[in-house]
Amino acid sequence: MANNVYDVAYNLETAVKESEEFKNLQALYKEVFAEESTKRMFENFRNIQLELQQKQMSGQEISQEEVEKAQQTVALVQQNEAIAKLMEAEQRMSMMVSELNKIIMKPLEELYSNVDAQ
């Protein structure tokens, strides 16, 4: 192989940074963070999201009150056009990263499936 895996990975990093998905996400982040009230709303949403994820990952129970608070926060941030666009762009970027991960992991999946078949 002419390039080693790390060179290819750095090329992929550059390709991601140059992608329309990333450039769009970057522009939307700037837009959200340019307005102080929008920035605070977004950061509050992210903090609630992170707290719930951490609780879930550590096996802690999430109360009904926390679920309702999260749902209210989601409804509120989705009413803000800039944040809603940012969340959509984040979802598209996440899908792209997930697809890239599938491509990268394919050789291992094939290896392990072939080992199981033997």
Image: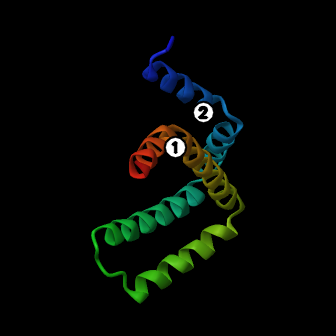
Q: Residues within 10 Å of mark 1 (few under 14, many from 20)?
A: few
| Residue 33 image label | none
* Residue 3 % position (x, y): 49, 14
Q: Residues within 10 Å of mark 2 (few under 14, many from 20)?
A: some
Q: Is mark 1 on a helix, strand or loop?
A: helix
- Residue at horizontal 43 percent and vertical 41 percent from the top: 111
Q: What element carries label 2?
A: helix
Q: N-terminal of the two: label 1 or label 2?
A: 2
Residue 56 lies, with reference to residue 31, above or below; the image says: below
* Residue 100 % position (x, y): 57, 41
Q: How far apart are marks 1 and 2 (CA)?
A: 13 Å
User: To which quarter of the image does residue 6 belong?
Assistant: top left
Three-letter code for the amino acid on which mark 2 is drawn:
Val
Q: Which of marks 1 and 2 is in front?
A: 1
- Residue at horizontal 46 percent and vertical 46 percent from the top: 109
Kindly identify which residue carries mark 2.
Answer: 16
Three-letter code for the amino acid on which mark 1 is drawn:
Asn
- Residue at horizontal 42 percent and vertical 88 percent from the top: 64
| Residue 101 image label | 1
- Residue at horizontal 56 percent and vertical 40 percent from the top: 103
Q: Left or right: 65 with respect to 45? A: left
In this orientation, which residue lies closer to the viewer: 9 or 104? 104
Q: How many labels does the image show?
A: 2
The residue lying furthest to the top in this view is 2
